[in-house]
């Protein structure tokens, strides 16, 4: 699914669950849940959209009219040797309400 397709869905009254995943300090991926399946948003070439910051990812979603998004940051701690997290999840998850519109510049 592309940002244009997501915008069309929202215009027609369907607002799917969307997540922005912080993969790296400079890579943020946007995922959309359709029929219970998580799919990355893609550009016109079919490649996953990689945003350089959380702000850029959220601005893309504001621009297409999305009102709610979850931000997810997976912790690397579970991969560290000797770190005992007792099975507790180590991801940070935050619900974000998007307001207004955004103008994308330079990215």
Image (cartoon, grey):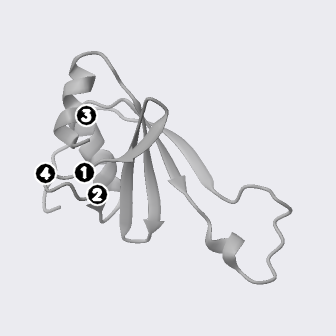
The 10 Å Cα crowd at callout 2, few under 14, some 14 to 19, many 20 or more, is: some
The 10 Å Cα crowd at callout 1, few under 14, some 14 to 19, many 20 or more, is: some
Q: Vertically, is 72 above or below 61? A: below
**Alpha-carbon span between mark 4 and mark 1:** 7 Å
Q: Nearer the viewer, residue 65 or 32?
A: 32
Q: Vertically, is 73 above or below 62? A: below
Q: Relative to 49, is 71 on the left or the right?
A: right
Residue pictured at 71% horizontal, 80% vertical: 80
Nearer the observer, disc 3 or disc 4? 4
Which residue has dot 3 on it?
A: 6
Label 2 with label 1: CB-CB less than 8 Å? yes
Query: Which numbered disc covers residue 44?
Result: 4
Label 2 with label 4: CB-CB less than 8 Å? no
Q: Relative to 48, is 17 on the left or the right?
A: right
Q: Position of residue 17 (x, y in %)?
A: 44, 33
Which residue has dot 1 on it?
A: 42
Tally the marks: 4
The 10 Å Cα crowd at callout 4, few under 14, some 14 to 19, many 20 or more, is: few
């Amino acid at each position: 699914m592309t940002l244009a397709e997501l915008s069309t869905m929202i215009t027609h009254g369907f607002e799917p669950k969307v997540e922005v995943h912080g993969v790296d300090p400079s890579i943020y991926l946007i995922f959309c849940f359709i029929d219970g399946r998580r799919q990355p948003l893609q550009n016109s070439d079919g490649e996953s959209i990689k945003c350089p910051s959380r702000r850029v990812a959220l601005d893309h979603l504001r621009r297409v009219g999305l009102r709610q998004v979850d931000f997810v940051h997976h912790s690397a701690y579970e991969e560290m040797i000797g770190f005992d997290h007792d099975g507790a999840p180590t991801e940070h998850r935050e619900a974000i309400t998007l307001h207004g519109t955004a103008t994308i510049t330079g990215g």
